[in-house]
Amino acid sequence: MTTTIAIWHNGYMKPAKAMTVRLSAEQAEELETVATVDDQPVSEVVRAAISEHIARRKTDEKFQDSLRDRIKRAERLLS
């Protein structure tokens, strides 16, 4: 499956990026079923799931702590 994602940055739409995702046969079938029932393209269901996942991670304190640690390490390497 290839999914194209458009990204807004500083008020401008960045070019869409095509990504390939490998799913098990069971995952692909379940995803297609969800998309069919919701009357949406599979790509839209995937984009919505990614958006929901990112939103949850942004509010996850453990993830945020880990992100801050990673940024600090990168800054030290650049200093």
Image (tube, rainbow, N blue to C red):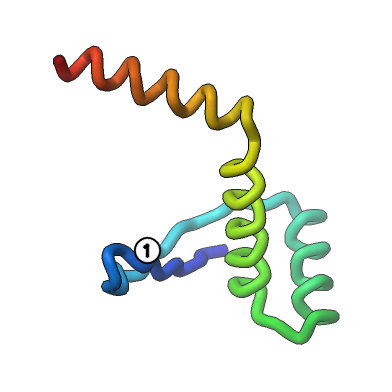
Q: Which residue appears at 25% of the width and 20% of the height?
A: 75
Q: How many marks?
A: 1
Residue 5 or residue 79, whichever sits in front: 79
Please determine whether, in this image, residue 61 is positioned above or below residue 11.
Answer: above
Please determine whether, in this image, residue 64 is positioned above or below residue 58.
Answer: above
Residue 32 in percent (x, y) is at 76, 71
Callout 1 environment at 10 Å: few (<14), some (14 to 19), or many (20+)?
Answer: few
Q: Which residue appears at 22% of the width and 14% of the height?
A: 77
To which quarter of the image does residue 68 belong? top left
In which quadrant of the rendered image does the N terminus lie? bottom right
Quickly name the residue at label 1.
17
Residue 47 or residue 32, whichever sits in front: 47
In which quadrant of the rendered image does the C terminus lie? top left
Please determine whether, in this image, residue 12 is positioned above or below residue 56.
Answer: below
Q: Which residue appears at 40% of the width and 22% of the height?
A: 70
* Amino acid carrying mark 1 in the image: Lys
Q: Is residue 40 left or right of residue 1?
A: right
- Tag 1, which secondary structure? strand
Q: Which residue appears at 43% of the width and 19% of the height?
A: 69
Residue 56 in percent (x, y) is at 66, 47
Residue 21 in percent (x, y) is at 56, 54
